Amino acid sequence: MRGGIAVITVKAGSHVRELLQLLSITGEIPASVLGIIGNERTLKILVHKLESVQEFRMVESGELIRTKLITVSGKRNSRTIRLAKGALSVLTSIDPDAADYYMHSFGNRNFSSDTMHTGRNHRVSEVIAMCTAAKIESRYYALPVLSLTERARRVPEAPSFFIARSLKQIGSEELNKTCFTRYIGALFYPGNCYAVYNTRDSVMKWSAAGERKIVAMLSDIARMNAGIHEVDSALIFGVDETTALQTVLESDKSRKQFGRMDRIYKKLHFIPLDLNGIRLLKIITLPDWNEKLLDSLFDTTQKLKSYSSIECDAISDGTLIFSHLDCDLARLIRFHDALFDTTETMEVLCFPWQVDFLSEYLGAHTKLIPIEMEELEGALNLNPKEGDYL
């Protein structure tokens, strides 16, 4: 302790370092992100501490830097955490590339106080925090530059998330016309790509024309940089599945033919903004993950070998089985609608945290069978160690 101020060591894996790197990419984060990247109570205490001048010891250089690291402003849903001006010296010491990116993107630090802009930044930061926790690369400055002029394999073999801001810089004039759409980026994984959305805790407004343009643009990017023919799947991050489902259903109010969200994307996977969502991200970014998932659940005698009027995955002792372990809301809606034409009891596989939501949405014709996440992780050779997602 020097002059009554404790010395904080900034080392790899420390909360201070993680906060710095996250803020260097997103510019600002909501308090909700703290519960994603670690213990929320511990991190709130740390953020409050970093609002005052502290002394930081840099492990790499041994340098001591005395500064305020964090500023917190705004009220309620607009309350936001940003880097203080003096934080740049600390960021430069630990990661010059991160500092350069931050200065390029947020150099004048004139963040808009408009709640719409703040909300969009918060949506992006929550997804990046989730990806970071799931070991998915999302640092723009650590990812390759994509192109629309020459076909080549540029995206990494490992899962990677490209924020919308970086995709707009590829060079297409049309991409810059999509700034008012609701997508916030694209997540590539071996063999496929997801468009990414985040409803947070409210129903997301939907622009069918804009989002159809996004699908076309992302498909072009995927073909030119990853050898992926088409982008037809999306991830919907959010606080709860009910809100995400309502977003899909409300999107029908666009009054455009085929304008609903599940008409534009064939698959819409819900990802909760919590530990369950982080673990789910690890599953749905595996190569051929859905086939592996179904193989782990059903043997060859159970899998359906003929067409069924109800979308389902298997049959056992005459009972049809539907798996919602993929959290695909588009499939769930089709399954729900088909239930009106049957009196049979169906079995639905789900995670324990989905039981209440599915009980309300699907009603009495379904028997829910909870499957623990650990069972799937084991079957897919994903065996996280304690602390992997903290």
Image (tube, rainbow, N blue to C red):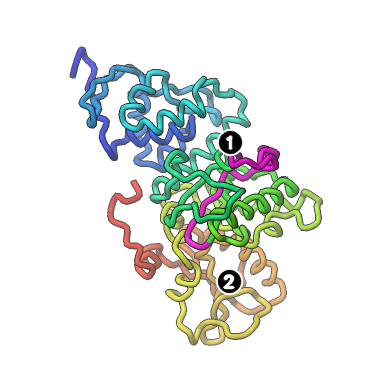
At 39% from the left and 33% from the top, the residue drawn is 97
At 55% from the left and 31% from the top, the residue drawn is 77
Query: Looking at the picture, does residue 275 appear above or below residue 321?
Result: above
> Is 381 one of the magenta-colored residues?
no
The image's mark for residue 366 is: 2
The residue pinned by badge 1 equals 120
**In this rendering, does residue 201 appear at all?**
no
Report which quarter residue 115 is drawn in: top right
The x and y percentages for residue 114 are 62, 25
**In this rendering, does residue 55 appear at all?**
yes
Along the line of sight, which residue is nearer the eye, 170 or 361?
170
Q: Residues within 10 Å of mark 1 (few under 14, many from 20)?
A: some
- In the rendered view, does 312 fall on the left or right side of 355? right
Amino acid tagged 1: Arg
At 23% from the left and 25% from the top, the residue drawn is 57
Query: Looking at the picture, does residue 5 appear above or below residue 371?
Result: above
Q: Magenta span: helix, strand or loop, mainly?
A: loop
Q: CA distance from mark 1 to mark 2?
A: 37 Å
Marks counted in the figure total: 2
Amino acid tagged 2: Thr
**Of the residues tagged 1 and 2, which is closer to the observer?**
1
Query: Looking at the picture, does residue 277 appear above or below residue 346?
Result: above
At 20% from the left and 12% from the top, the residue drawn is 3
Residue extent of the magenta highlight: 168-191
Q: Residues within 10 Å of mark 2 (few under 14, many from 20)?
A: some
